[in-house]
Image (cartoon, rainbow, N blue to C red):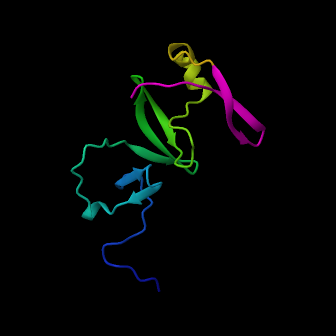
Amino acid sequence: MERRAPHCRPVSRAEDPSRIDFDRQRITFYNPNYFDYSGTGTSLPVHFEAGSVVAEAVVDEIPGQFEIDSGSILSLLLNAIFVKQHDLARRYEATVRGYAGEGFGGPDSGLYTHAAL
């Protein structure tokens, strides 16, 4: 029989509070019954989709659903369909093409740029 402290339980629900600390490379999940947040962070609605955590957020005033990839070396990765639909390559003058990862089809490339937060 598994034993746990009374305030601990498995966390698998998207609505449970969590904190992503990029500097320490750590994700912390909290029990909502014992969680009281008083910081300046932003709450994002998330859900699980095909084994990924997806956040409902806004990029450049464009709402969308964005996968949270805590293992990525990139700050933000937008897929080609989203970029084309909203003309983001032109808007951000993205002209530098480079390695963007590797999947079942082999290596992939992408456009890189900087954006103000």
Vertical placement of residue 8 versus 64, above or below: below
- Residue at left offset 38%, top offset 43%: 45
Location of residue 95 in the rendering, given as x and y in whole percent from the top left corner = 62, 18
- Residue at left offset 70%, top offset 30%: 109
Location of residue 10 in the rendering, given as x and y in whole percent from the top left corner = 43, 68
- Residue at left offset 51%, top offset 17%: 92
Q: Is residue 90 rendered magenta in the image?
A: no
Occupied quadrant, residue 90:
top right
30 lies left or right of 89? left
Residue nearest the observer in this picture, 79 or 41: 41
Which residues, given as a range, are shown in magenta? 96-117
95 lies left or right of 40? right
Location of residue 108 in the rendering, given as x and y in whole percent from the top left corner = 72, 33
Which quarter shows the C terminus? top left
Location of residue 9 in the rendering, given as x and y in whole percent from the top left corner = 38, 70
Furthest residue toward bottom: 1
Task: Give the number of marks.
Answer: 0
Q: Main secondary structure of the magenta part?
A: strand
Vertical placement of residue 90 versus 24, above or below: above
Residue nearest the observer in this picture, 61 or 97: 97
59 lies left or right of 84? left
Occupied quadrant, residue 94:
top right
Residue nearest the observer in this picture, 96 or 68: 96
